[in-house]
Amino acid sequence: MSYFFTKLIYPHFAKSNWCSLGYKYISTAVANFTLILFNSVLYILQKLSQYRYNSDMNSEQEYNLGHASESHDYLTRGLKNNMEALALKENAKILDLGCGNGFVTQQVANWGYEVMGVDPHPVAIEAAQKNYKGINFELKDSSDKNLKKASFDFIYALEVIEHVYDPFRFLSDCHNLLRPGGMLLLSTPFHGYWKNLALAVTGKMDAHFTVLINNGHIKFFSIPTIEKILVHESFSIKKIDRLGRIPFLAKSMMVLAQKESLAPSQNS
C-alpha cells in the first residue's frame, strides 16, 4: 500500500509547485496509517461480529429461563427511550408482538405499563408464562382473529419482521390492530453498504444470513427498504435510530412510525 501511494499518488502531487519531498513523506505516512487503520478495523470487526448460532443445552436453558440475549440491552434501552418520549398514558394498551420468552415484556411491565405479549411459537409462550407471572401472554400471531382491531395505542416488535415470510401482511396486521394515530416501533438488523462490506471482508456473511438455523432471518432490510414498506402500508415514519456499535456498522435499526388514516389496501 505504501508503494501505491508513493508511486501512483505522489507523482500527481509532484507536478505542483509544492515541495515534492514533503509530499513523499506525507504520502508514505498516510499509506502506513491507512494500512494500520484498515487492519485495526478488521480486527475490531472480527471481535464484534461474533454471532452465536448453536442450539446446545445451555442456550436452550437460558431461553427457557426467560433470560436476556446479548441484544436485549440496547434494544430495551431504545424501546424505553421511545416510550418515554411518546409520553404514553397510564391506561394505554400496549402489545408486544413477537414477545419470545417474555423478557422484554416483563421489562415494560416493570416500567409501569400494562402490556400484553403474543408469539406464535409454543415454546416461547410456555417459557414466558412460566417465568413471568401476572402478565398476559398468549399463543397468537399478528393475524389472529381474536386480537381486536383498532384496540392498541402502541405496538412494538423487536427483531421480528426479519423472520416473517410476508412482511407486508405483518405490517398490514399492525395497522389494523392500532387505534387511529397509534404508534408502531420496529427493530430489525441494520444493513447498509459499509456493514455489508465489512461482513463480506471478515467472512461473517454466511453466519449473518443464518442459513443453517431453523426459523432464522429471511428478510434483510436497509433504511430505504424499511421506509418503503412502512409507507406502502400506510405508516408515516417519525424517526429511525441505529443501535449497537457505531452507526454505519450498527447491529440494528429501530423505526418509530405512526398509523395513518388510510387503510393499507387504499394506499397500495
Image (tube, rainbow, N blue to C red):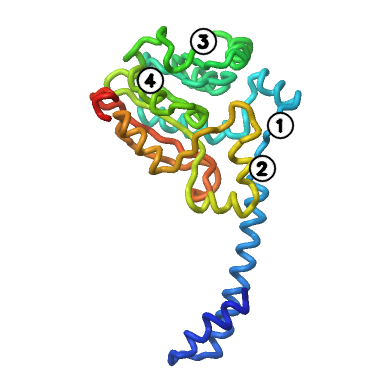
Mark 4 to mark 3 CA distance (whole Å)? 17 Å
Q: Quadrant of the C terminus?
A: top left
- The amino acid sitting under disc 2 is Gln
Of the numbered discs in the image, which one, if any, rests on residue 104?
none
Whether pointer 4 and pointer 3 mark residues with C-beta atoms closer than 8 Å, the reply is no
Q: Residues within 10 Å of mark 1 (few under 14, many from 20)?
A: few
- The amino acid sitting under disc 1 is Asn
Q: Is residue 250 above or below residue 91?
A: below
Q: Which residue carries the number 4 mark?
A: 173
Q: Which residue carries the number 1 mark?
A: 54
Mark 1 to mark 2 CA distance (whole Å)? 12 Å
What residue is at 35 percent from the left and 33 percent from the top?
Answer: 230
Dot 1 lies on which element? loop
Q: Residues within 10 Å of mark 3 (few under 14, many from 20)?
A: some
Mark nearest the camera among 1 and 2 is 1
Mark 2 to mark 4 CA distance (whole Å)? 34 Å
Q: Is residue 231 above or below residue 155?
A: below
Q: Residues within 10 Å of mark 4 (few under 14, many from 20)?
A: some
Q: Which residue carries the number 3 mark?
A: 138
Residue 179 image point, x, y percent: 30, 18
Q: Which residue carries the number 2 mark?
A: 50
Mark nearest the camera among 2 and 4 is 4
- The amino acid sitting under disc 3 is Glu
Mark 4 to mark 1 CA distance (whole Å)? 32 Å
What residue is at 46 percent from the left and 39 percent from the top?
Answer: 221
Q: Total number of numbered labels? A: 4
* Image quarter of residue 121: top right
- The amino acid sitting under disc 4 is Asp
What residue is at 40 percent from the left and 9 percent from the top?
Answer: 145
- Report the side of 12 relative to 4 (left or right): left
- Report the side of 167 relative to 211 (left or right): left
Q: Residues within 10 Å of mark 2 (few under 14, many from 20)?
A: few
